[in-house]
Image (tube, rainbow, N blue to C red):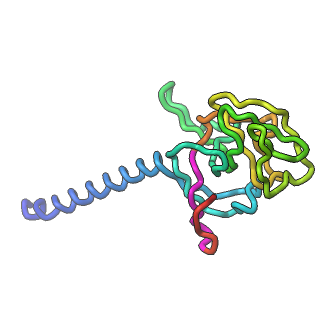
Amino acid sequence: MTALRETLTPIYTALGMASAAVLLAALILCKLAQLVFVKGGSMEHTLRAGDLLLVTKWGKYGRGDVVICHYPRRSEELLRLGAAFSLTKHTVFVKRLAALPGDTVEIAEGRLIVNGQVMEDPEKMASPPRDYPCRRLAKNQYFVIGDHRASSHDSRASDVGPIPESMLIGHVRFRLWPLKRIGRIK
């Protein structure tokens, strides 16, 4: 019996250590990065439906960054265990940061204007343009917009509007799939 125990102890120890390492790696990955599949066409031609993206959860946000955000007022509580724990499913969306906290933003005659400067816009705010009145963003607000303006539901819409930083999940850094389009996202 002791010979068997001596043989199995190192195996159990190795399995325990491997399990702990996998669990620790998974916890770190959940806090630092996540994988997201694109659904919809609001970011065409930058991103397409079916793209697999690597999203990182660190770093400062800058104008022009592609980000993943929680969709305002679209979450569902799946489980609640008292006041201390709840599991919530959030709808997320991918957009580009057009304006940052403290910026002024407006859309007039199909042109995106940030801090009084017309922003270069490859989509030219595809018709019909949705004007957006000039406003200064609060110190915790971001204005997000899809690259394919005609099919994007974003900060221009009254049910979305500028979003707080707490709704930003992270930066879209890299496309992992499809392999023929693998690469960094700009």
Please give the name of the residue rendered at 67% of the width and 37% of the height, measured from the top-left corner.
142
Q: Residue furthest left?
A: 2
Query: Observer-nearest residue: 108 or 72?
Result: 108
Q: Quadrant of residue 13?
A: bottom left
Query: For the view shown, which residue lies furthest in the bottom direction?
Result: 180
Picture quarter containing residue 35? bottom right
Residue sticking out furthest to the front = 117
> Is residue 154 placed above or below 47 in the rendered structure?
above
Q: What are the residue bounds of the magenta stretch?
A: 170-179
Instruction: Tell me which residue sits at (17%, 61%) in the image.
Output: 10
**Residue drawn at (67%, 57%), measured in percent from left and top?**
38
Left or right: residue 12 compared with residue 173: left
The dominant secondary structure in magenta is strand
Q: Position of residue 67 (x, y in %)?
A: 63, 48
In the figure, residue 8 lies in which quadrant?
A: bottom left
Residue 56 lies, in percent from the top left, at: 52, 51
Say left or right for 135 vs 30. Answer: right
Residue 65 or residue 52, whichever sits in front: 65
Please, which residue is most extreme toward the top here? 83
Can residue 93 be seen at all in this image of the molecule?
no
